[in-house]
Amino acid sequence: MTTKSERTQQMFDLVEKAQESHLSKRQFCEQHGIATQTFYYWQKKYHQQKGHASEGFVPLSLNTAKAVSSDFIEITYPNGIILRIEGHPDADFISRLIKA
């Protein structure tokens, strides 16, 4: 039987492993036999304890040279996924993608 602190450490180790993985959260959870809801619970606890609690803001940077001369918008997520959107989408659409 594991103690609460051992269980916490096991789950924090999984959260760190997931961050290093190139798998989606769903794929990672399936591989490790845990429910996605359980994973997200422990991910939140991990970030709270490590001082990474999100306040709902995502840092953005704008490359004005690219923005002026390009017909696309590129969003790079913290997990390394890059999303390129051709054309000129509206701000509401971009906002929803950033929050995804």
Image: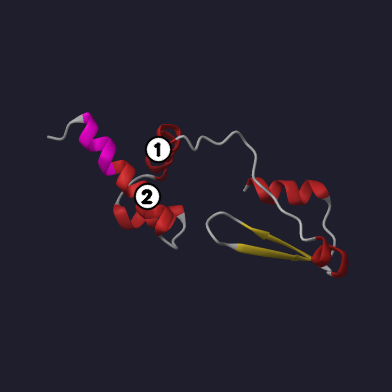
Q: Indicate the secondary structure of the residue bearing disc 2.
A: helix
Q: On the rendered structure, is 49 left or right of 99?
A: left
Question: Is there CB contact under 8 Å for labels 2 and 1?
Answer: yes
Quarter of the image for residue 50 reads top left
Quarter of the image for residue 9 reads top left
Does 64 appear above or below 58?
below
Quarter of the image for residue 70 reads bottom right
- Image position, residue 65 (x, y; %): 83, 66
**The N terminus: image quadrant:** top left
The mark found on residue 46 in the picture is: 1
| Residue projecting furthest to the right | 68
- Image position, residue 54 (x, y; %): 56, 36
- Image position, residue 14 (x, y; %): 32, 49
- Image position, residue 17 (x, y; %): 35, 54
The stretch drawn in magenta includes residue 57: no
| Residue projecting furthest to the top | 4
The first of marks 2 and 1 along the sequence is: 2
Q: CA distance from mark 2 to mark 1?
A: 9 Å
Badge 1, how many Cα within 10 Å: few under 14, some, many 20+?
A: many
Q: Amino acid at mark 1?
A: Tyr
Q: Residue at x 41, y 60 (%)?
A: 21
Does 81 appear above or below 35?
below
The mark found on residue 16 in the picture is: 2
Segment tinted magenta in the rendering: 4-10
Q: Residue at x 33, y 58 (%)?
A: 31
Q: On the rendered structure, is 100 left or right of 2?
A: right
